[in-house]
Amino acid sequence: MRIPLSYVARNLWARRLTTVLTAGGLALVVFVFATVLMLDEGLRTTLVTTGEYDNVILIRRSAESEVQSGVERAQANIAASHAAIALGADGQPMISKETVVLISLLKRGSDKPSNVVIRGIDQRGLVLRPQVKLSAGRMFRPGASEIVAGASIAKRFAGAGIGEKLRFGQREWTVVGLFDAGNSGFDSEIWGDADQLMQAFRRNGYSSMVLRLADSGLFARFKQDIESDQRLTLEAKREQTFYSDQSRALSTFISILGLTLSIIFSIGAMIGAAITMYASVANRTGEIGTLRALGYQRRNILAAFLAESMLLALAGGAAGLVFASFMQFLSFSTTNFQSFSELAFGFRLDGAIVVKTLLFSLAMGFIGGFLPAVRAARMKIVDALRAA
């Protein structure tokens, strides 16, 4: 014979003030836990959506980012002649030879500098990134000192708006357009003509090559051919995989920091839940004795008090999750540990995070309520009734 769940819920309602205060502490912990998961998911989603699965990126072997990479012109020409590369409508290979440079710009409204990625692309660079769309102005003209800025860059950095000018590489560059990259990492970049940027920064080679294969299934063979060619010192990766790897260091840092904070806060929350449940047991001694006298077993009492603690935690977890969901309206920027450039991304909530968060709150309720529930279950009928 089990104690009805409605009875457990009425006990929580009867102690509304204590219930609200305890649930509030649990909600705070859940809020921190959920926002950390959302931040990590937002980071990974931003960088994964930066790359196209069907695109392949070539960088120098052992280079961890495009900034550290270098592709000689001769090597670029050899790689571009591979038969597996798709051809465009004009019969030319679908390849973009790109230059990536870091510059320091000042943020709007402050004198605080931050690193920004300048990417030099050729005429096919935009075609290979269908998620990138011009949102205002026009595209830069090949051979001109013109640039287009990502939506995130235009908002946060001085001189990056349409019609404004930026000075770098011993030149003055005019911003002629803004592009929207669908909240991907490209939103935190500035694009210009590859040849002009190479001249400005006195580069003799490219940083990377982006290409599309005629058939995605040819990737393994293409990768083997490129990496086994003695004339080349290049490594081939799917573009999506490459950008996913870029989030590894920062994602690990966020996860460790968030887990540490969540553990510290959850210990306090579980202690608070345990104190609340101990007080509940002490105030309901006569009630426990009556339940035992009515025929309820020790395990029924244990299950009822555990259910009460977990229901309390679930209420706090749901509240914390609701408040955490509003974080999706905010954006966050920090330095990417891989490229040392500023990266803007947002909080992202999905079904997996909801499940993890609610399980975390239930675990806190179970741990915090277990000992008080054991105490309630071990009470003897006569002693409980006498104490009442």
Image: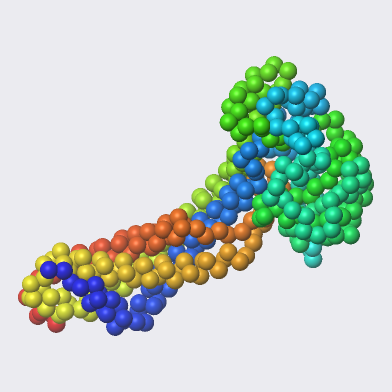
Residue positioned most to the top: 230
Q: Position of residue 51 (x, y in %)?
A: 65, 43
Left or right of 280, for residue 137? right
Residue at 83 percent across and 60 percent down: it is 161
Q: Is residue 342 visible?
A: no
Q: Quadrant of residue 164?
A: bottom right
Q: Residue at x 71, y 24 (%)?
A: 82
- The image's colouring method is rainbow
Q: Residue at x 11, y 78 (%)?
A: 290
Residue situated furthest front in the rendering: 89
Quarter location, residue 129: top right
Q: Is residue 155 visible?
A: yes
Question: Taking 370 as reference, is 382 above or below it?
Answer: below
Please provide percent x and percent y for residue 332: 64, 59
Q: Nearer the viewer, residue 157 or 197?
A: 197
Q: Would residue 261 appear left or right of 204 to someone viewing this image?
A: left
Which quarter of the picture shows residue 340? top right
State the image coordinates of residue 25 (x, y, percent, origin top left). Answer: 42, 70
**At which x and y percent is residue 212?**
69, 35
Q: Residue at x 34, y 82 (%)?
A: 16
Q: Could you tell me which quadrant the N terminus lies in?
A: bottom left
